[in-house]
Amino acid sequence: MTARSSQLAWPSSYGSASGVASGPPPYPCPALSLLPQPHPKFCLLALPCHLPPGREGGSGAPEQAECVELLLALGEPAEELCEEFLAHARGRLEEELRSLEAELGPSPPAPDVLEFTDRGGSGFVGGLCQVATAYQELFAAQGPAGAEKLAAFAQELGGCYFALVERRLAQEQGGSDNSLLVRALDRFHRRLRAPGALLAAAGLADAATEIVERVARERLGHHLQGLRAAFLGCLTDVRQALAAPRLAGKEGPGLAELLANVASSILSHIKASLAAVHLFTAKEVSFSNKPYFRGEFCSQGVREGLIVGFIRSMCQTAQSFCDSPGEKGGATPPALLLLLSRLCLDYETATISYILTLTDEQFLVQDQSPVTPVSTLCAEARETARRLLTHYVKVQGLVISQMLRKSVETRDWLSTLEPRNVRAVMKRVVEDTTAIDVQVGLLYEEGVRKAQSSDSSKRTFSVYSSSRQQGRYAPSYTPSAPMDTNLLSNIQKLFSERIDVFSPVEFNKVSVLTGIIKISLKTLLECVRLRTFGRFGLQQVQVDCHFLQLYLWRFVADEELVHLLLDEVVASAALRCPDPVPMEPSVVEVICERG
């Protein structure tokens, strides 16, 4: 019998798949050629000669399994074979990991996240499944000890794979395409179902789910930041529109149009964010049935974290314009305060309820954790609107007050000439008040006024115009000895209605204008009390106050308020005048009509 006729028939798997060329083994065993027929045990003896040195070559899991079966039949120690089997598999799987890591480098550009997860799933995860299946078939007799080795092996390499996947997913956090990211996460999670079932002790499926949950939380944070940036962008656009110069014959967008643009832009961004994060809960996504995505993601993530968080952030941003005006650049334009107050009021009346209802309908919450009631959020928005409108009143009142204060402080009231005209500053006050009335009327309703008397525009101011002042100067009031007029004035104030200058502002035009006019006239009164007036100075105050009364009464809720404050101004000027000779009412009327 020749040696050629007695050679072993080698397993077909010992071909090119194992990294060795087809044909006779590179390290032939001479003893085999002496046998008339191949014997299994001699075949097993030849197997180590066929495997590459150290049995760490590139053969796949099926080839390894065939080799291990033969070695087990030969009586090789199973524990040693376990170690060598896993060591050989580690080399191949680590090569897959190195290939994935190379794709994360700065050059060449990394493939898209879907392609990356596909490669990882078909390469590393597929190889891990083959190793786990072969190991469990070959070493089932090893019992719990063998299973623990396999679990530790899978957990270690799985951790390396997860780290690479998270590095690649981190590169997607700034992107805007949620659909591609969700598809990649779905592939990643779906491919780990098989090893997760085979290697339950390794916790691969749970670790994959945790990665998906972390990515979902990060995307919620990304969309929240996007909504905040969109809101700030809208405010910047409004500022630019308000500050843009107006060309002759062309009017810029009005406040109502700007408000509509801001509201629609914010709402469209909210809807887009809801649609983007809703992809995480789609039925066709493998992880959408997990408890997190059926409960906490919807209630605490989307509703509370994204929607409620943005609405509260919007209110806080709006309130910041009330806290420190002018510290970070120029002062806030009053028109922006007015627009934001109306925006928050609209959110309180309708928008918040609509947005939360839309969110609850899209994300069917199955979580019993507490959520923010609609009423609580509406109350916060209303309080923000109130603060903004109150600040608007103070800012506009301060602007007019500054004009009045400078006009009083810079004039020599003792040596002034006999009045012939209304001072220009009073005309400017009326013009500015009228402009504010128009501005507020663009966003707020009229409001309620008290019934007005028929002579509101004909009343003339003098030092005797009110009953209080008449009693002060009437000779019959002091038959025997003159009474201290300051004392009499203070006594009468105790029985007069107190004027609350900084009373709460209601959401209507009349209340806003009333607040501004109260601040302005109170400033005028306090400035007059600090000056000394000559006869003509007193008469000029009469003329100015009558002019203000002619126009300001129609803006306030109660015209008596204007009368009382202007009475106080004229009376205070009279008290600080050494020679209080009032001007005839008819002359005052003529001057004001001419002015």
Image (tube, rainbow, N blue to C red):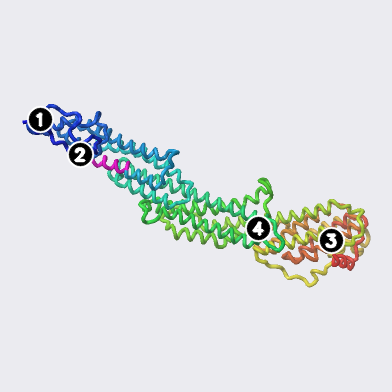
Q: Which residues are magenta?
A: 123-137
Dot 3 falls on a residue whose secondary structure is helix
Tag of residue 544: 3
Residue 187 pos. (x, y %): 36, 49
| Circle 2 crowding by C-alpha within 10 Å: few under 14, some 14–19, many from 20 | some
Residue 333 pos. (x, y %): 68, 54
Q: Amino acid at mark 4?
A: Leu
Alpha carbon of mark 2 to alpha carbon of mark 3: how far?
Answer: 110 Å
Alpha carbon of mark 1 to alpha carbon of mark 2: how far?
Answer: 23 Å
Instruction: Left or right? Give the position of 73 relative to 174.
Output: left
Q: Earlier in the sequence, mark 1 or mark 2?
A: 1
Residue positioned 83% across, 54% down in the render: 407
Q: Amino acid at mark 1?
A: Ala
Q: Amino acid at mark 3?
A: Asp
Residue positioned 80% across, 62% down in the render: 548
Q: Which residue is mark 4?
A: 338
